[in-house]
Image (cartoon, rainbow, N blue to C red):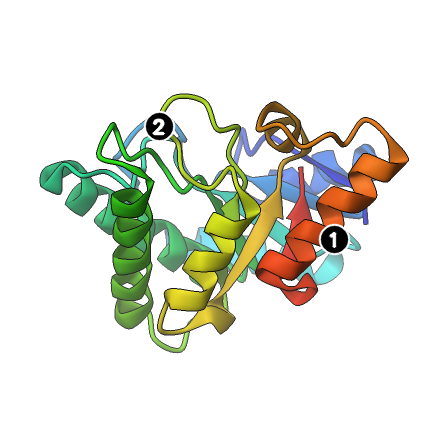
């Protein structure tokens, strides 16, 4: 199923018109501005319209991308707490709209080290999951490019998170091919791509791979 990230300008449900016009089989959207913490509450009529349009559209599943500001790997308590609250809101919005998955950048350890960053990610996900028990929408951890102090650029690190959270069934992985290439995986050849996919499958399990960028 091939799709695109489409605009929601004019209302969330308008994304279906754009996706269908492009010939998409699936699509990704933002449910709020990706560059701000604030999220205007969804109105009941917005939710009804989006869900009604989704039932009539061949474009499925719909996935969303979380705000870029979220950094659940951060060693700074205030930023991490703000990020956890924001992530919970994003997941609540997906659940209300019937959106299957929420793509999330794992974040940056900001110099504290990969172990600290991954530990923070695991703790944050457990807290969000505990606060959203029973939700069907799941979080997809996106592979990172490995620049700076980002976490999640090694497949083994994503596998470590999936293996440590209390409810791994509520998580998945989004493979960003640009990020994977930047992280050093040689996917420009058939052999390199096959090797990378094999490593990814061993690290996280094929069932966890839910989306490709």
Label 2, secondary structure: give it.
Answer: loop
Residue 120 in the figure: left or right of residue 101? left
Q: Is residue 107 above or below residue 162?
A: above
Q: Quadrant of residue 132?
A: bottom left
**Outermost residue to the left:** 78
Looking at the image, which is closer to me, 116 or 34? 116
Write down the residue under mark 1: 198
Q: Position of residue 116 (x, y in %)?
A: 25, 45
Q: Residues within 10 Å of mark 1 (few under 14, many from 20)?
A: few
Q: Residue at x 36, y 37 (%)?
A: 107
Query: Which x, y percent locates residue 212?
Result: 69, 43
- Residue at mark 2: 149
Of pointers 1 and 2, the one earlier in the residue sequence? 2
Q: CA distance from mark 1 to mark 2?
A: 25 Å
Q: Position of residue 118 (x, y in %)?
A: 33, 49
Q: Is residue 209 left or right of residue 83?
A: right
Task: Indicate whether 127 appears above or below 15.
Answer: below
- Residue at x 76% of width, y 32% of height: 187
Position of the C terminus by quadrant: top right
Q: Is residue 139 visible?
A: no
Residue 60 seen in the current view: yes
């Amino acid at each position: 199923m091939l799709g695109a990230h489409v605009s929601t300008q004019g209302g969330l449900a308008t994304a279906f018109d754009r996706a269908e016009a492009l010939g998409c089989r699936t699509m990704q959207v933002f449910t709020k501005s990706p560059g701000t913490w604030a999220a205007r509450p969804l109105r009941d009529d917005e939710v009804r319209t989006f869900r009604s349009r989704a039932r009539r559209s061949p474009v499925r599943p719909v996935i969303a991308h979380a705000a870029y500001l979220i950094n659940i790997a951060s060693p700074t308590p205030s930023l991490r707490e703000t990020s956890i609250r924001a992530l919970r809101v994003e997941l609540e919005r997906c659940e209300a709209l019937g959106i299957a998955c929420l793509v999330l950048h794992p974040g940056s350890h900001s110099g504290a080290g990969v172990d600290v960053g991954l530990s923070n990610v695991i703790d944050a996900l457990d807290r969000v999951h505990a606060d959203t028990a029973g939700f069907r929408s799941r979080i997809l951890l996106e592979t990172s490019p490995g620049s700076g102090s980002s976490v999640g650029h090694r497949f083994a690190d994503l596998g470590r998170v999936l293996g440590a959270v209390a409810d791994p069934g509520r998580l998945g992985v989004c493979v960003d091919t640009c990020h994977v290439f930047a992280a050093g995986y040689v996917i420009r050849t058939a052999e390199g791509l096959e090797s990378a996919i094999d490593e990814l499958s061993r690290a996280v399990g094929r069932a966890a791979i839910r989306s490709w960028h």
